[in-house]
Amino acid sequence: MRGFCSLEGKTALVTGASRGIGRAIAEELAAAGASVVVGYRSGEQEAEEVATAIGGRAVQADVSDPTSALALVEAAGDIDILVNNAGLTRDGLLARMSDDDWHTVMETNLSSVFYTCRAVARPMMKARAGAIVNISSIVGVHGNGGQTNYAASKAGIIGFTKSLARELGSRNVRANVVAPGYITTQLTDVLPEEATEAMRQQTPLGRLGAPEDVAGAVRFLVSDQASFVTGEVLLVDGGLGM
Ligand code: NDP
């Protein structure tokens, strides 16, 4: 259904859209009428499949690299919507965390957001239109043992996005955060069953999230139905973090 939260005529770039939450976001935005650029790093076949299915275009880039991230934005062309979804975890207790695990997570999850947002800021301000959604995490709001690097990167996204919303608001460019709770994807597949079950029991809605749950929230935030919403952090977590 394209009426409510229609994105007809808009072009969107979604990073990390070869699978998981990013894929669901790309599919949802396309279903809303947007023309979607499917960003991916290594999952070429998966990304091409997504792009073909939604009539979009797949573009390879490592968003943790400033040159590659800029090339991705340039290849995407004039975009109305940017969704920074690419991310990863390198979990471990702080006392044992390597420099590499710290920097990889910060560069992939947070610096990437800086690189792509910087690249779209000027054209969006000039167009006096644009919607950015950055994907954080409930862990960026509440913290989580074993994830100091991940939590710092995801909390950083929140401060970054609120500042960006203040900078770009007068030019009608909006920037919001979606902070998912526990969503079933490859990222969470590695967690032990007991941890998953404990999470489900603590979630008021009594289930784990699906990528589509996050995609619907993103669709709303980038649509004209959210035209007075900026600098917001929307938890999509089944009530886990309230
Ligand atoms: P997945 O591991 O399933 O997918 C991650 C995606 O990010 C892949 O498409 C991957 O591409 C891409 N990616 C990773 N590193 C890079 C990079 N350097 N450059 C470009 N693309 C990259 O994860 P999810 O779908 O679960 O997570 C998506 C986002 O949601 C992440 O930011 C994650 O932190 C966040 N999130 C997830 C939650 C969950 O419970 N699943 C909860 C809260 C937040 P490729 O494989 O091609 O490298």
Image: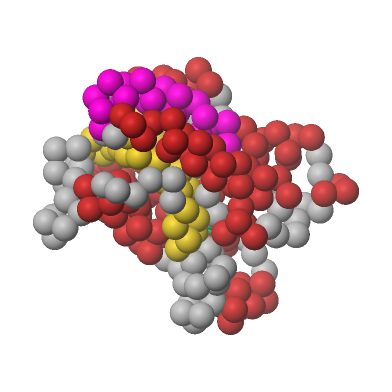
Q: Residue at x 23, y 53 (%)?
A: 225
**Residue 35 in the figure: left or right of residue 99:** left
Q: Position of residue 98 (x, y in %)?
A: 81, 39
Q: Is residue 82 magenta?
A: no
Residue nearer the viewer, 100 or 155: 155
Residue nearer the viewer, 55 or 85: 85
Q: What residue span does the magenta drawing correspond to? A: 108-130
**Residue 124 in the figure: left or right of residue 54:** right
Q: Residue at x 48, y 22 (%)?
A: 68
Assign the magenta stretch its main secondary structure. Answer: helix
Q: Is residue 4 above or below residue 121?
A: below
Q: Position of residue 39 (x, y in %)?
A: 39, 35
**Residue 241 in the figure: left or right of residue 170:** right
Q: Position of residue 147 (x, y in %)?
A: 71, 53
Question: Is residue 182 visible from the viewing direction of this image?
Answer: yes
Q: Is residue 58 above or below residue 151?
A: above
Q: Residue at x 36, y 20 (%)?
A: 122
The quadrant where residue 142 appears:
bottom right
